[in-house]
Image (tube, helix red, strand yellow):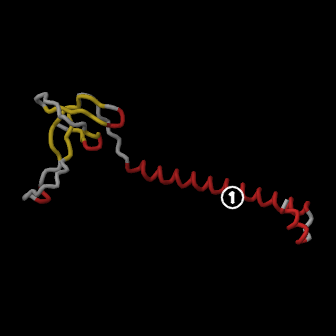
């Protein structure tokens, strides 16, 4: 056992060495708990800041909605170009916020639309 030869060379009693080692281990546990406490506080602060910006979408099946236009094509109207397109009817809402929409004639759009890209249509 190598630690015994080190103890003999340094003239440290094994009892004192064991006590010092135990205190080191206890302080490591305290540091770990403190770090975990700080990490949880940080996660709560980040979640609170994120959740402040989240807008609830109270959309249901059958609601009229507008779809955001995200075309990167050139539009001569510049900043006056339309930002929303529609109205559409929500046909189906799936888990995770995916929706299937149809136009007013009943023609279903082929791709699913994320609920973040929809806005409630006010008449």
Query: Residue at (36%, 37%) from the top-left corner?
Result: 96
| In the depicted structure, whether residue 99 falls above or below residue 16 | above
Query: Residue at (72%, 58%) from the top-left corner?
Result: 28
Q: Nearer the viewer, residue 2 or 27?
A: 2
User: Residue extending furthest front?
Assistant: 1
Query: In the picture, residue 14 is in which quadrant?
Result: bottom right
Residue 97 in picture, x, y percent from top left: 33, 37
Residue 89 in picture, x, y percent from top left: 19, 32
Query: In the picture, residue 22 is in which quadrant?
Result: bottom right
- Which residue bears the numbered disc 1? 31
- Specify few, some or many for label 1: CA neighbours under 10 Å numbering under 14, 14-19, or 20 or more: few
| In the depicted structure, whether residue 50 falls above or below residue 17 | above
Query: Residue at (17%, 50%) from the top-left corner?
Result: 83
**Image quadrant occupied by the N terminus:** bottom right
- Residue 95 is left or right of residue 13, and the answer is left
Query: Residue at (36%, 33%) from the top-left corner?
Result: 95
- Residue 10 is left or right of residue 48, and the answer is right
**Image quadrant occupied by the C terminus:** top left
Q: Nearer the viewer, residue 19 or 105?
A: 19
> SS for tag 1?
helix
Q: Nearer the viewer, residue 72 or 5?
A: 5
Query: In the picture, residue 113 is in which quadrant?
Result: top left
Residue 73 in picture, x, y percent from top left: 13, 55
């Amino acid at each position: 056992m190598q630690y015994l030869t080190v103890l003999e060379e340094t003239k440290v009693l094994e009892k004192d060495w064991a006590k010092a080692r135990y205190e080191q281990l206890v302080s490591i546990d305290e540091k770990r708990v403190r770090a975990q406490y700080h990490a949880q506080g940080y996660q709560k602060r980040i979640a609170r800041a994120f959740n402040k910006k989240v807008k609830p979408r109270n959309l249901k099946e059958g609601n009229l909605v507008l779809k955001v236009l995200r075309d990167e094509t050139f539009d001569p109207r510049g900043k006056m170009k339309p930002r929303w397109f529609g109205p559409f009817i929500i046909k189906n809402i799936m888990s995770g916020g995916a929706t299937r929409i149809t136009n007013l004639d009943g023609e279903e759009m082929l791709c699913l639309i994320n609920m973040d890209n929809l806005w409630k249509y006010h008449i």
